[in-house]
């Protein structure tokens, strides 16, 4: 009897390769692979690119098994892609959206969901495949990837509960997707909420109930177009002193922060409430201090003060909230 050898060479075929091509299409290196059952050269390149990246996620705590890095389309690849019929994809899904310069497996968005995945209570789908380093933010790429994953046939979000766990610019991008959603889209009928860490679009005075050092009353996120009301089921995890999520409406200092934010998040250099307009006024009033603040922020989107409230959180309550809204 001849033992089975997994496809690994161009020209070979497998009935589950079309599903693998759709899976890989969520990444920049897996576009335009087609729908055929043939193991093509572009498919092999994409598979070999994906495998070591995926194994690195396992090294950081994602559930195994590891996958071969030699391009073999074996059982482990099929299982991790959700193609083996093992039932992994029937559990609720959590979409994780990382912050600027963040890592898909080290941010609070992922780490809050990870304990539930380790217990096989949920499936995590990380949002990648976009430029997470450019300034101004390239939010369109992140929004497009979120929307693509929401409608990825393999994820079946029209058939199962899902939530979002987001951080910083990832929260900003997800809020924009929420605002532009089609309420009649069946995907959104299964959305249960989630968590937003350090959300620049935090609605006025909306804060998760477990936050001990909550932002001051009368504050909202730093974005110029914050949410008018909370997203149902979405816990706003923001702390006192987080300048991305704690803005006092109408204050001159807040106007400067919003102006800088318009530049780094939306690329708005000129026009009403732009950084150029604000600096022309404020530099004459405060001189070098304003310029130093502007330079520090635009150099790495890091305010020239303590950034810990924007990046450090008690994750256990957020994990519990995800479990609660997904009923897992």
Image: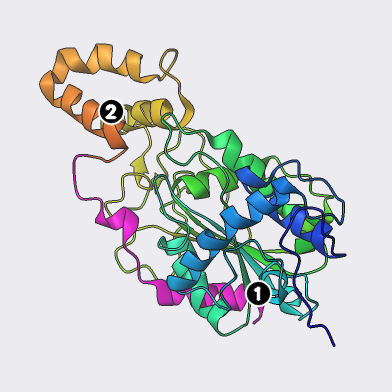
Task: Pick whichever of labels 2 and 1 is earlier in the sequence.
Answer: 2
Give the image's coloring scheme. Answer: rainbow
Tag shown at residue 252: 2
Residue found 43% across the figure and 29% down from its top: 136
Which percent across, then down, holds residue 39? Answer: 78, 55
Q: In the rendered view, does 276 fall on the left or right side of 53?
A: left
Image quarter of the N terminus: bottom right
Query: Vertical placement of 114 versus 49: above or below?
Result: below
Majority secondary structure of magenta residues: helix
- Can residue 228 be spotted in the picture? no
Left or right of 17? Residue 77 is left
Pointer 1: what residue?
A: 326
The reply, left or right, for residue 125 in relation to residue 35 is left
Query: Would you call the spot at circle 2 few (<14 residues within 10 Å), some (14-19), or many (20 or more)?
Result: few
Q: Nearer the viewer, mark 2 or mark 1?
A: 1
Q: Going 36% across and 44% down the picture, which residue do you hit?
A: 244
């Amino acid at each position: 009897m001849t033992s089975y050898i997994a496809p690994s060479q161009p020209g070979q075929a497998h009935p589950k390769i079309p599903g693998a091509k759709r899976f890989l299409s969520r990444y920049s290196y897996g576009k335009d692979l087609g729908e055929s059952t043939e193991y093509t050269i572009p498919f092999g390149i994409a598979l070999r690119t994906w495998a070591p990246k995926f194994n690195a996620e396992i090294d950081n705590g994602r559930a195994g098994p590891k996958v071969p890095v030699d391009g073999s389309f074996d059982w482990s690849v099929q299982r991790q892609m959700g193609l083996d019929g093992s039932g992994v994809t029937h559990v609720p899904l959590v979409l994780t959206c990382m912050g600027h310069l963040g890592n898909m497996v080290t941010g609070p968005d992922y780490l809050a969901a990870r304990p539930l995945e380790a217990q096989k209570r949920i499936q995590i789908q990380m949002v990648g495949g976009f430029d997470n380093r450019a300034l101004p933010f390239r939010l369109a790429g992140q929004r497009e990837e979120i929307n693509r994953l929401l409608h990825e046939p393999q994820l079946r979000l029209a058939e199962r509960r899902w939530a979002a766990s987001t951080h910083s610019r990832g929260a900003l991008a997800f809020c924009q997707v929420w605002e532009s959603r089609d309420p009649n889209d069946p995907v959104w009928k299964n959305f249960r909420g989630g968590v937003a860490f350090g959300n620049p679009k935090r609605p006025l005075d909306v804060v998760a109930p477990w936050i001990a050092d909550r932002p001051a009353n009368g504050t909202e996120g730093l974005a110029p177009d914050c949410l008018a009301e909370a997203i149902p089921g979405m816990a706003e995890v923001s702390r006192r002193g987080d300048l991305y999520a704690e803005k006092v409406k109408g204050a001159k200092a807040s106007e400067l922060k919003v102006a800088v934010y318009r530049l780094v998040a939306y690329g708005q250099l000129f026009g009403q409430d732009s950084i150029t307009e604000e600096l022309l006024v404020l530099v004459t009033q405060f001189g070098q201090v304003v310029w130093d603040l502007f330079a520090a922020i635009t150099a790495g989107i890091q305010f020239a003060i303590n950034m810990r409230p924007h990046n450090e959180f008690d994750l256990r309550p957020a994990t519990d909230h995800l479990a609660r809204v997904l009923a897992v």
